[in-house]
DNA sequence: GTCTATATTAAGATAGAC
DNA sequence: GTCTATCTTAATATAGAC
């Protein structure tokens, strides 16, 4: 079930606080590792009050996930056929990296769900995600056929873009400790590196 | 604490079965999401018998993790200064990809631990992992200074190699569903793609 | 709407027979 | 060494007062 229809201001505020707190906890521990106690504490509400707004732990998790996939695919949807191919893909890389910077918890929520076997989003992966990826893969192949892009496997190109950009959210602790940097510092360097790498890999030989 | 010293054949066999089963469960659900009941069932032993071999759930987890980091860094240790730089790094990519193919559970165990804040391996990340990465980053910079490698940030190069190769283990469900392939099929394509991408990005301009 | 109290189940760990 | 039975705590969820 979804959240109760938020009629009053209090309802809207509390539902929001619960989802915020749940995002904190689920994204770090996954569904099974998260507890309502912890979510309640982060949200500043009592545990029974949580269950006044959502019928169950699972309902909270589903609410978070169901909105996620759509947002998550937005950067790929924005990959258009009218621009210069290499720059179009570099823009996509930058948008995806920006998602990791602004929404690291969402990235980790997604990563946790996939790691645990994607029980609640398998349909969306085989459905809208695959459909969109197939569509954009065709676009990339068309660009390659026109000689405007180096001949690369479009699917594995997308996997590599997801992996490299989401890495800065999902593995941020490791990134920060290895670099000895804090906050958003790694992202600026990452953008330079990834731009350079993908430009080299995608620019067609003259 | 570590596993009891395995004197008899039965002890060795059961300890091994427990660690095998625990790897299955911890790698999918993370420490908090895993249960002893599940591990016991997979191992084909009773729950109390598990705790005859290991003093606690945490002890099993620590045993798995403590051996992991060392193995995990082996491919990077093998990056030597005596070969041709581009091919040396491509070999590293292939070794890392092979780790994902052969040891996906270990990769996911590691990913889960990092996602959950790396509570049990933060020391190793700041210690041996960072030390090794710093060392190899210096090697890469030396190659660049000699003009034998395109000028790339060595740290983000390594992050990207970790991300792209481990992706095929950690997100394997998504990879398989998007490609509509099963088993090891994606790995052969991935090797071609990654080899091509890193060769393009790393080969110095003539 | 929110809380205290509590029912119920699951999980980590132990006791003690065999 | 292995099991059944059980203790104890924690977790999801509900009842019912306010």
Image (tube, coloured by chain):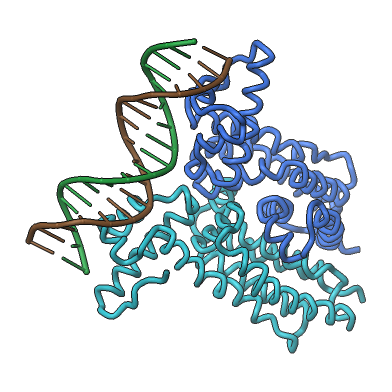
Chain colours: A blue, B cyan, C brown, D green
Count of picture labels: 0
Q: In which quarter of the image is the C terminus of chain A?
A: bottom right
Question: Quadrant of residue B133 in the image?
Answer: bottom right
Relative depth, front residue between A192 and A87: A192
Residue B4 in the image: above or below residue A150: below
Q: Position of residue B186 (x, y in %)?
A: 58, 58
Q: Where is residue D3 in the image (x, y as percent from the top left)?
A: 17, 56
Q: Residue at x 53, y 39 (%)?
A: A122
Relative depth, front residue between A167 and A123: A167
Relative depth, front residue between A149 and A38: A38
Residue A155 seen in the current view: no
Is A74 positioned to the left or the right of A37 in the image? Answer: right
Q: Where is residue A67 in the image (x, y as percent from the top left)?
A: 64, 30
Is B14 positioned to the left or the right of B90 in the image? Answer: left
Q: Position of residue C17 (x, y in %)?
A: 9, 57
Q: Which residue is farthest bottom?
A: B82
Q: Which residue is drawn at 80% across and 37% down?
A: A78
Question: Quadrant of residue B15 in the image?
Answer: bottom left
Is B82 positioned to the left or the right of D1 in the image? Answer: right
Residue A152 in the image: above or below residue A121: below
Q: Residue at x 49, y 45 (%)?
A: A33
Question: Quadrant of residue B191 in the image?
Answer: bottom right
Residue B37 seen in the current view: yes
Q: Which residue is drawn at 61% across and 67% down?
A: B97
Residue A201 in the image: above or below residue A117: below
């Amino acid at each position: 079930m979804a959240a109760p229809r938020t009629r009053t201001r209090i309802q809207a505020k509390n539902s929001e606080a619960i989802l915020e707190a749940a995002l904190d906890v689920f994204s770090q521990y996954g569904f099974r590792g998260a507890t309502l106690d912890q979510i309640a504490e982060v949200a500043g509400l009592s545990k029974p009050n949580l269950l006044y707004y959502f019928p169950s732990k699972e309902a909270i998790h589903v609410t978070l996930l169901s909105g996620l996939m759509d947002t998550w695919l937005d950067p790929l949807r924005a990959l258009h056929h009218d621009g210069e191919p290499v720059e179009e893909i570099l823009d996509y890389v930058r948008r995806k990296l920006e998602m990791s910077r602004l929404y690291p918890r969402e990235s980790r929520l997604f990563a946790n769900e996939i790691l645990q076997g994607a029980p609640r989003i398998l349909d969306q992966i085989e459905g809208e995600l695959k459909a969109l990826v197939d569509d954009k893969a065709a676009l990339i192949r068309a660009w390659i056929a026109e000689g405007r892009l180096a001949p690369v496997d479009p699917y594995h190109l997308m996997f590599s873009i997801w992996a490299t950009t989401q890495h800065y959210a999902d593995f941020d602790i490791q990134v920060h400790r290895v670099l000895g940097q804090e906050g958003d510092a790694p992202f600026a360097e990452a953008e330079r590196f990834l731009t350079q790498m993908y430009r080299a890999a995608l620019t067609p030989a003259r």
